[in-house]
Amino acid sequence: MRKRLIKLLSTLCITIMAGGILAGCGGNSSGDVKSSSSSEKVTLTFGSHQSGLPTSGVVQELAKEFETETGTKIDFQISPDAQWRDLLKVKLDSGEAPDIFCADADPLNLVTRVNPEKYVMDVSKEEWVSRMDPNVLPSISNNNKVYGITFPGKKMYFYVYNKEIFEKLGLKVPTNYEEFKNVCQKIKDSGVTPIFEGTQNGWHQVLPLFETGAMYQQKHEDLYNKLNKNQVDLDSVTELATIIKQLKEFSNLGFYGENYLSNSVENAKEEMVNGKTAMFIAESAWRSEVKADFPDFDTNKLGIFVMPWGDNQAIGVNPASNAYFVNKNGKHTDEALKFLAFLAKPENLQKRLDGQPGLSEVCWPEIQSKYSKEDQAYIDSLKKGMVMQAGVKYIDSQWMDIGKDLEAMYTGASTPEDILKTIMNRRTEQAKLQKDPDWNK
């Protein structure tokens, strides 16, 4: 009896040991990926700034579908745009970053924003990477490794304008600054605010300075390369200084209305629908957002034209956008990767495009864009070039600061000349902090 008991115990121990060995061998082949047991209910934290997620809530809706399908819940943690970049850096450095986080991505600033080699999962071998537009891959890659996933197609900002107001006043779309100023004066004289400027958001008033980068490149040979190698500085781009002065002139002339320093981008739709404002800087698909919020409004009344600051007639193209990254030091990297793969399914890409009114296209060639024939024909007729913030170092990283600089200029606390000097000084400071060899010779 005693011998039988010893034999039984020995067999049991061997079985337990074998089970442990099999469990150890049966994990994910990637050493970086941590997964939870099948019986554990997982909640993924997803950190983002306000602009990182569509206002329509389509990503949250897809997250609910993912939860239904997998049992994994997504907890969205949204921060104000102006705070997110600094907050994310603090969270990454302290080891408290969410499982998935959203960050603005472009080839020049990815490393300084998220330090991918230290904090982000390498997703190069994920199936969906090969289906993204190759033009966006440099924005989410470093040292030949892909670290993120992105969805919006190329960004192009226009003036969206009220055709009825223009027709009523006998106005034509302006093609240079003087025409633009005359149009605004006639609109103001009619009792309508010419331009809605969302100054409270901080980023919006900066668009005229750097979305016009295509024009700068046309007028200055090899400009971006020379700026990045510190061979010239921004004061050599005379058109940039001109545009800053023109923004100040428009403020002085009252073309933004009386209380524009209190305006937020979110209120622009109502102002345009009610005919209180004639123009607003936005992407062409912003009109779909207007339709979503005001279904009775005929958005065919809204047209688009190139921002004519500094006599610009080229359209700036921004291949970069916000992207989603998996925290490699998170507790649930396996589930996080599965969520990215879920978002990348063709049917979910289509849902995202359909469910995000302000989006004209996604950077996934398999999904057809939403541009109308009229818009597409107009866009095709324009000369194009990369926006300055995506092509020149140390511009985008100070974007929100420049927004505050412009506010100070509008209130009279600084001058256009001060603005340009400040932007140049910040570039130098940031370059030296990054130990950029072209600034440390």
Image (tube, helix red, strand yellow):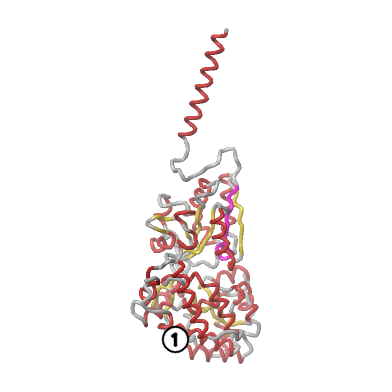
**Can see residue 249?**
yes
Judge by depth and name the residue closer to the eye, 161 or 244. Answer: 244
Up/down of 162 relative to 91, above or below: below
**Label 1 crowd (10 A; few <14 / some 14-19 / many >=20):** some
Looking at the image, which residue is at 39% across and 70% down? 440
Q: Is residue 174 above or below residue 341?
A: below
Image position, residue 189 (x, y; %): 61, 92
Residue extending furthest toward the top: 1
In this view, the residue farthest toward the left is: 221
Quarter residue 101 falls in:
bottom right
- Residue depicted at x 61% and y 56%: 76
Q: Which residue is mark 1?
A: 311
Query: Residue 7 in magenta?
Result: no
- Where residue 300 appears, x then y in whole percent? 54, 76
Residue 196: quarter of image:
bottom right
Residue 347 visible in image: no
In what quadrant of the picture does the N terminus appear?
A: top right
Relative side of 130 to 62, left or right: left
Q: Position of residue 271 (x, y in %)?
A: 63, 78
Task: Give the residues drawn in magenta, as a range.
Answer: 43-54
Residue ID at (52%, 25%)? 16
Disc count in the image? 1
- Give, as a three-letter code, the residue at label 1: Asp
> Is residue 161 placed above or below 76 in the rendered structure?
below
- Quadrant of the snapshot with the C terminus: bottom left
Q: Quadrant of residue 29?
A: top left
- Seen from the viewer's position, the closer of residues 70 and 149 is 149
The location of residue 68, given as percent across then percent down, is 59, 47
SS assignment at label 1: helix
